[in-house]
Image: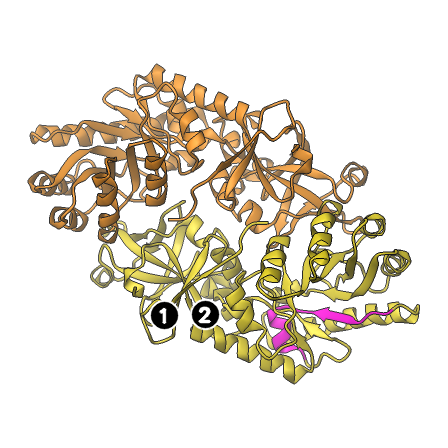
Chain colours: A orange, B yellow
C-alpha cells in the first residue's frame, strides 16, 4: 500500500519525523537535567509512547483513564493522569493501581482530597498548582495547598507523590522572551509549592512542569524533576507558528481528495471537513499572516506546502479551499490527493482510530498504529 | 446502570425525544407529499435509522462510504451517498452495488462523470445542483448540468438516478420568512434541474432536497420526490436557536463531572473539553443572547437547562464554566454530574463510539447503540 492508495480522508504519520521530534525533546530534557514524561494525550499510541520514552525513565503522562489503562497494558506502568479526578473515577484508578500500575492521580480541592482519604483503594496523589493559566490548580502561596497535602498525609491509603503545574498560557506567547518568562513562572510556581510542602515536613518527590513551548524555552529547570510536553511528538501549524518547531517537523497529517472544482467562484472542495480536520482554529490567534484556516495543503509525497493553500471553511465532510491562480485547478484535478497539515494536531488526530505509518522520503505504508480514543 | 453511574464524559441519548423528533419529521414529509430519506450523518446508527425511516420507503442518506456499508449490512439497501465522489472511491461504491445495495453516488463535474463512464463497475448516479449555498453542485441553468447527464446517459454501466441539492445556507436564516425563501429556492433549483434534463429526453426519477430548516419551513415541495434532513433526529442548540425545534427536543447530550472549583476566579471546570464537546461554535452566529459557548449545562436527570450556565472555553479535556452566583458551587460540588447540550450535535457525537440510551423521565440506561464513525 502506498500513500496514493489510501482511502480519504485518512490519518498518516511520518515515523522519521516523529523519531526526530522525540530525540530532540529527549536531548532537551537531558540538557535541562530533568526526566521527560511525555504527554500521550496527543499520540495516544503505545508505539509513539515507545519512541517518546526512549532513553528516558519510562514514565508517561495521560489525559484520560482509558489512555492510562491502555498504556499500562502495553508496558508503561509509571503513569501520571494529569487531569483533576472526580470521586466517581477513584474506583477505576484504584483498580489500575491494584493491578500493579504506579498511577499518580491529580487533585486541586479539599473535597477531592477527602474523597481519596475515605476511598478504600490505594492512591498516589499529585496536587495541581496554577502557574498563571487559570485552568485548574491551587496557588502555590495560599493555605489551600498545604490543607490538601495534610489531608493526604493523614490518609491511611494515600501517598503524596508531588506537585505539578502546566503553563498552558505559553501558547499565548509570541516571542522567545515571552516563552522564557512563562517558563520561569511555571518552574518557580512548582518549585515554590514543593518547598512549601517540604517546609512542613512533607515529602514531595515529584516536581513536574510542562508544555512544549516552555520545555523548549526554559532557561533552567532547577528544582524540577520532570517535564511533560506532548504536542512536540507530532507537531502542528500552531506550534510551527509560535516557533516550537518548523513546518517540516509536522509528522502527522490528513490525506484528502479533491472532489469538486468551482472555477466561477474560485474554490475547490476536499473530502476532509469538520470531522476529519476538527473545527479547531488555533492559528486564528496568530494574526492574518499566521492564520492557516482549518489546515494547510501540502504535497502528498513530500509534505511540502502547496502554494500557501489553506482550508478556509468546513462542512461536516467538505473542506473548502480558495484558489487564487486558475492554473491550480490543473495541478489539483478532481481526484488529486493532498496532505492537510493540522492546526492543532491533538484535536485533528482524535477523529481517527489509528495512523497509517510511513518513513520520510518513502511513499510505502509500513504499519498501522492504533490510537486509544475515548474515556 | 443509571445516568448517575456513567463514567464521564459520556454520550447519552433520550430515545423518547428521538422517536418524537422522527415522528414529527415523518408527519411533515407526509404533509408535503414527499418521501423522507433521513440523513444518517448525524446519528450514524442502525437503531436511529430504524426510527427515522419508520413509515417511510426506507431510503437513507449517508455522508461516508463507511456509513453506507454499515447501513447496508443492517438492512438498509436504498442509500444516497450525498458527498461528491472522487474516482478513487468508485471501486468501493461498485462493490457495495454488486452486493445488492441500491447505492446512489453523487457528482458535479465532467471529470467524475467520465471516470464513472470508464469504470468497470455499475453505478447509479445523482447530479448535485447548487441552490445558493455554494458548497458543491452545478447551476441548474448552465450547460454543465446537461453535459454531465449526457456522459452518464451514454455510459454503458451507469444510470442517471436524479438530481439533488442541499440548502445548507438555510442555517444562515433567522426568521420563518428567511427559511421559506431559502426552501423555495432549494425546491425551484432542484425541480428546474430535473425539468432541464427531462426536456432533453433524459429520465430523472429522483428530485431530492433537504436540510432540517427547509424541511420544516417549505411552503410546498411540488415536483420534489424526497427530502433529506438529518440533524432534527437528535437536535442541538443551534437548531433550537433558529427555531427548528425546542431546547426540550434535544435528544443527545454529554454527561460531564465537575472536577475543579475556583471561587476566586468565579469559574468551575468540567471533565468535558474540546474532544468531548467538539470545538464547534455554531451558536456564535446567533449573537450574544443566542451564543451558547461550547454547550449549555443542564440537569442530569431532567435535561432542564441549569441557570443559563454555558461552557465558555475548552482545553482538550477541560470545559470552563463561568459561575456568576457563588451559591452554584454548592449546587454543583466537585463530582456533581450534569448534561451538556451540544452546539452542533453532528460534530459532538462524532467523538463517541456509541450512545447510552434511556427513556425520557427515567434514569435507567436501557441500551448501548453503536455509531459507525470514520470513513
Circle 1: element type? loop
Residue A282 on the magenta segment = no
Q: Mark 2 lies on which chain?
A: B
| Residue at screen point 67% across, 78% down | B218
The mark nearer the N terminus, 2 or 1, is 2
- Pointer 2 local density, CA inside 10 Å: few below 14, some 14–19, many at least 20: many
Q: Is residue A288 left or right of residue B153?
A: left
Q: Mark 2 points at which residue?
A: B250
Residue B229 vertical position relative to residue B69 in the rendered view, above or below = below
**Mark 2 vs 1: CB contact within 8 A:** yes
**Number of marks:** 2
Q: Can residue B284 be seen in this view?
A: yes
Residue B206 on the magenta segment = yes
Q: Give the range drawn in magenta.
A: B203-218
Q: In this view, does B285 lie to the left or right of A170?
A: right
Question: Quick one: B295 or B307, which is closer to the camera?
Answer: B295
Q: Position of residue B294 (x, y in %)?
A: 44, 56
Q: Mark 1 points at which residue?
A: B303
Q: In this view, does B333 lie to the left or right of B99?
A: left
| Residue at screen point 81% across, 48% down | B119
Amino acid at each position: 500500500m502506498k500513500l496514493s492508495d489510501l482511502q480519504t480522508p485518512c490519518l498518516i504519520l511520518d515515523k522519521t519525523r516523529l523519531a526526530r521530534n522525540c530525540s530532540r525533546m529527549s536531548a532537551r530534557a537531558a540538557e535541562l537535567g530533568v526526566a521527560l514524561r511525555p504527554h500521550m494525550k496527543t499520540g495516544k499510541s503505545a508505539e509513539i509512547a515507545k519512541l517518546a520514552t526512549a532513553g528516558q525513565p519510562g514514565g508517561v503522562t495521560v489525559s484520560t483513564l482509558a489512555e492510562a489503562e491502555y498504556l499500562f497494558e502495553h508496558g508503561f506502568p509509571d503513569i501520571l493522569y494529569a487531569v483533576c479526578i472526580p470521586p466517581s473515577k477513584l474506583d477505576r484508578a484504584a483498580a489500575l493501581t491494584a493491578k500493579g500500575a504506579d498511577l499518580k492521580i491529580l487533585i486541586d480541592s479539599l473535597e477531592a482530597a477527602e474523597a481519596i482519604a475515605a476511598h478504600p483503594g490505594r492512591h498516589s496523589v499529585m496536587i495541581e498548582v496554577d502557574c498563571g493559566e487559570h485552568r485548574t490548580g491551587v496557588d502555590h502561596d495560599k493555605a489551600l495547598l498545604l490543607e490538601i497535602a495534610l489531608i493526604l498525609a493523614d490518609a491511611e491509603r494515600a501517598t503524596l507523590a508531588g506537585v505539578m503545574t502546566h503553563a498552558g498560557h505559553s501558547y499565548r506567547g509570541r516571542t522567545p522572551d515571552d516563552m522564557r518568562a512563562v517558563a520561569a513562572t511555571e518552574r518557580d510556581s512548582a518549585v515554590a509549592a514543593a518547598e512549601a510542602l517540604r517546609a512542613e515536613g512533607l515529602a514531595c518527590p515529584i516536581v513536574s512542569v510542562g508544555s512544549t513551548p516552555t520545555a523548549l524555552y526554559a532557561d533552567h529547570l532547577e528544582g524540577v524533576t520532570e517535564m511533560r510536553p506532548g504536542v512536540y511528538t507530532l507537531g502542528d501549524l500552531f506550534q510551527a507558528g509560535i516557533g516550537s518547531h518548523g513546518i517540516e517537523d509536522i509528522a502527522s497529517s490528513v490525506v484528502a481528495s479533491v472532489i469538486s472544482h468551482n472555477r466561477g467562484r474560485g474554490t475547490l472542495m476536499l473530502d476532509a471537513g469538520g470531522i476529519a480536520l476538527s473545527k479547531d482554529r488555533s492559528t486564528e490567534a496568530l494574526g492574518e499572516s499566521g492564520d492557516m484556516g482549518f489546515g494547510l495543503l501540502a504535497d502528498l509525497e513530500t509534505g511540502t506546502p502547496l502554494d500557501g493553500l489553506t482550508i478556509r471553511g468546513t462542512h461536516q465532510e467538505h473542506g473548502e479551499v480558495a484558489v487564487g491562480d486558475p492554473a491550480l485547478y490543473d495541478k489539483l484535478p478532481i481526484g488529486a490527493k493532498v496532505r492537510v497539515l493540522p492546526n492543532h494536531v491533538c484535536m485533528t488526530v482524535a477523529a481517527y482510530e489509528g495512523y497509517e505509518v510511513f518513513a520520510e522520503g518513502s511513499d510505502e505504508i509500513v504499519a498501522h498504529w492504533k490510537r486509544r480514543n475515548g474515556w
